[in-house]
Amino acid sequence: MSEQPDFSKFQFKRILMNDTQRKMVAVEGNFNGCSKPAVIVMEKYAFDKASIMNVCSSGTKFTKDVENDVYKSFTCVPQYNENISSNKMDLIHPATQKHILKFSSQPLYIVQETKEMYQEITLPFILDNSLSLQWVYNCLEYTSEKERIKYDTACEKDKDDNLNGFLLIPDLKWSGKLDELYLLAIIKRRNIKSLRDLTSKHLPLLKNILNKGTAAIYRLYGVPLSQLRIYVHYQPSFYHFHVHFTYLMHIPPGINTEKAHLLSTVINNIELLGDYYQSSTMNFVIKEGDPLFSCFEDKGILSKSKLLIESIKQ
Ligand code: G7M
């Protein structure tokens, strides 16, 4: 059996690949005294109960980065080694059943939501059952995350600010590392819930977000439009219209085709057909435990067993 390599002699040359989603990195270098190159691939282990309890222990130093309504975000550094294995931790407290569902892994289904289904089932449901928008209003009113706001269209003294204005703020999920860039544009007006509400009269708002949002990000972080993924979710978790800006090389959750809609495509669709998002059938993904799933089931639109039988027949 060959000897254990002496990793203290490893000379770093360059990062070949940094997979921010898998927390995996490939590095080129060489060992002192050896001219032949070496590649090291490092990957963080998945969490288990022991590692969770290790983070949630008195041996960890927590620094609060964000506090907004029931949401807090911390950087957690184990005291035995301050240089490695820091974790980002988000806390929701008190959490509702809706929060618990939002973070639970569950069987998923695709809904093909016609305009009638939206009006009769989805809309009444979201009007009665959505997550609180308090954190959004706290941002808009500068009562939380004030120091984190990166751009505010009001700074341009635009007379249209309350109609087409927005704030640009780091998403709660952003670690702050440039290669994981993640910002949100939150609109100022409070009467657009989701994609379904957008019509041609909102084109100036959407173009404002696209143009001023990308210009601000380029100014602040040097990331150009061509390296940004700019999209909205359908269904969103929060029914106050907002747009996600993420770095193209980073793969955050929620960019799959069943959930993310590129803002440029949204603008294009509305330019082609002013009521595109009122008249289209929209696909979205739903969890089995979501009460909205039960509403579709009650109307005979979704059925777990029917879907199963149909998939077996094919
Ligand atoms: O799925 P939806 O499009 O609704 O996404 C909402 C986004 O808002 C997610 O990417 C969240 O990480 C982000 N977010 C949620 N909360 C509660 C906060 C918050 O309190 N502050 C900030 N900055 N972002 C949040």
Image (cartoon, rainbow, N blue to C red):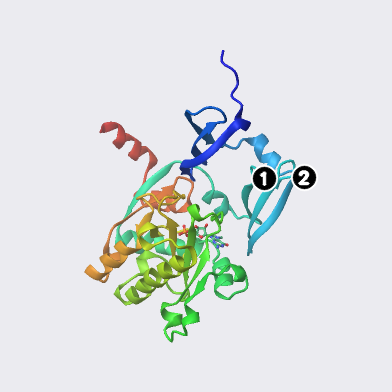
Residue type, label 1: Asn
The front one of 72 and 181 is 181
Count neighbours of disc 1 (C-alpha within 10 A) and say few if under 14, some if 14 to 19, many if 20 or more: few
What residue is pinned by disc 1? Answer: 83
Pinpoint residue 245: horizontal percent, then vertical percent. Answer: 43, 61
Q: Residue at x 67, y 45 (%)?
A: 83
Q: Residue at x 45, y 66 (%)?
A: 217
Q: Residue at x 48, y 43 (%)?
A: 18
- Kindly tell me whether residue 230 is visible in this rendering: yes
Pinpoint residue 55: horizontal percent, then vertical percent. Answer: 69, 43
On screen, 57 above or below 123?
above
What residue is pinned by disc 2? Answer: 58
On screen, 145 above or below 92?
below
Residue with the most extreme left position = 272
The front one of 82 and 100 is 82
115 left or right of 17? left
Q: Decide: marks 2, 1 in contact (CB < 8 A)?
A: no
Pinpoint residue 210: horizontal percent, then vertical percent. Answer: 37, 68
Quadrant including the C terminus = top left
On screen, 14 above or below 145?
above
170 left or right of 203? right
Sequence-first disc among 2 and 1: 2
On screen, 152 above or below 287?
below
Count neighbours of disc 2 (C-alpha within 10 A) and say few if under 14, some if 14 to 19, many if 20 or more: few
